């Protein structure tokens, strides 16, 4: 599934058939020295690593590391994306390109697009990043992207530099404004962007794992089922103003917009997520 396009690049979900490229990428000396040695040495191990590390998070959290390929010839260049680590409180931006494709601005182009995606699609105004203190090119890129160095510590893979990016300006933080922002982002994912890409890949990030969404025929679907049938393209009602009703405890909200009723709940970060979508009729 395509995630986003830039003038030169396509970022898409990794697939099992990308295992040979992954095996080569994560065994390059520059990758091992600057990122980590994953201990993956054959195709079967690469397939298993890709499934658990790359593919599974797409459905679990709605984002992750995506394959970066050149649009002109579909040449795979590396990976870039927004990854949620158990060891960090927020998702972080990560990237890594093959040595032969370094130095051509691909990492910068992909990373900048990921920051726009994080804000516009995922509703993230803040991301983290981690680097090795010896990875000068990566640290220079983070500074160019607007990340601020926060300190150095000893992490799971040795000495680690922590970085943080904050969007400017940040979106309003009152509950009604955030619920309105959520519903607009949800339906924006259903329609094509300027490049013709529909951001359906992000829906697991906007919904609870158990969310139910009503299709046009009245059938209730899981998030995965909704994505797999192609979602729904919004109508002219997107020009109207959503109506938000907050629960007294502030942990639930109902948003009506056009023909749809959205039930939202708070997640562990107190961000809104969809638990139920149904027709108002």
Image (spheres, rainbow, N blue to C red):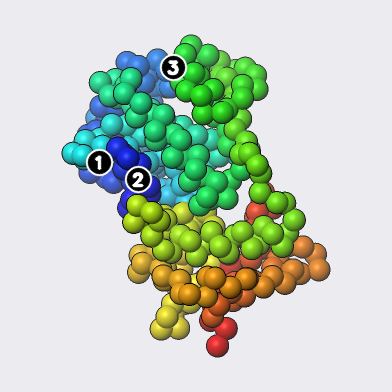
**C-alpha span from label 1 to label 2:** 8 Å
Q: Say whether marks 1 and 3 touch (CB < 8 Å).
A: no
Residue named by callout 3: 137
Viewer-proximal residue, 132 or 114? 114
**C-alpha span from label 1 to label 3:** 24 Å
Viewed as shown, does residue 116 lie left or right of 195?
Answer: right
Residue named by callout 2: 5
Residue 55 appears at what percent x and percent y? 37, 46
At x 30%, y 37%, the residue is 8
Residue 251 appears at what percent x and percent y? 73, 62
Residue named by callout 1: 71
Mark positioned earlier in the residue sequence (1 or 2) = 2
Count neighbours of disc 1 (C-alpha within 10 A) and say few if under 14, some if 14 to 19, many if 20 or more. some
Secondary structure of the residue carrying tag 2 is strand
Q: Residue furthest left?
A: 73
Q: Say whether marks 1 and 2 touch (CB < 8 Å).
A: yes
Whether residue 248 is visible? yes
Residue 94 appears at what percent x and percent y? 46, 32
Secondary structure of the residue carrying tag 1 is loop
Mark positioned earlier in the residue sequence (1 or 3) = 1
């Amino acid at each position: 599934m395509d995630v986003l396009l830039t003038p030169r690049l396509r970022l898409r979900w990794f697939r099992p058939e990308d295992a040979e490229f992954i095996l080569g990428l994560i065994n390059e000396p520059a990758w091992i020295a600057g990122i980590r040695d994953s201990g993956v040495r054959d195709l079967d191990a690469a397939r298993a690593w890709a499934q658990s590390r790359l593919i599974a998070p797409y459905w679990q959290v709605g984002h992750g590391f995506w394959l970066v390929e050149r649009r002109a010839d579909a040449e795979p260049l590396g990976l870039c994306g927004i990854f949620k680590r158990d060891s960090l409180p927020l998702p972080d931006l990560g990237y890594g390109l093959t040595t032969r494709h370094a130095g051509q601005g691909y990492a910068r182009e992909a990373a900048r697009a990921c920051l726009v995606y994080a804000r516009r699609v995922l509703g993230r105004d803040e991301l983290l990043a981690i680097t090795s203190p010896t990875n000068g090119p990566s640290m220079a890129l983070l500074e160019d992207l607007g990340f601020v160095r926060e300190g150095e510590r000893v992490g799971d893979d040795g000495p680690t530099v922590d970085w943080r990016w904050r969007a400017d300006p940040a979106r309003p933080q009152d509950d009604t404004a955030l619920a309105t922002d959520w519903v607009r982002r949800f339906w924006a994912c259903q329609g094509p962007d300027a490049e013709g890409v529909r951001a359906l890949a992000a829906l697991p990030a906007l919904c609870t794992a158990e969310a139910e969404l009503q299709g046009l025929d009245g059938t209730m679907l899981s998030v995965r089922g909704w994505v797999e049938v192609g979602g729904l393209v919004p109508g002219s009602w997107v020009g109207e103003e959503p109506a938000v009703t907050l629960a007294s405890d502030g942990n639930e909200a109902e948003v009506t917009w056009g023909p749809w009723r959205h039930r939202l709940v708070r997640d562990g970060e107190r961000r809104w997520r969809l638990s139920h979508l149904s027709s108002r009729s």
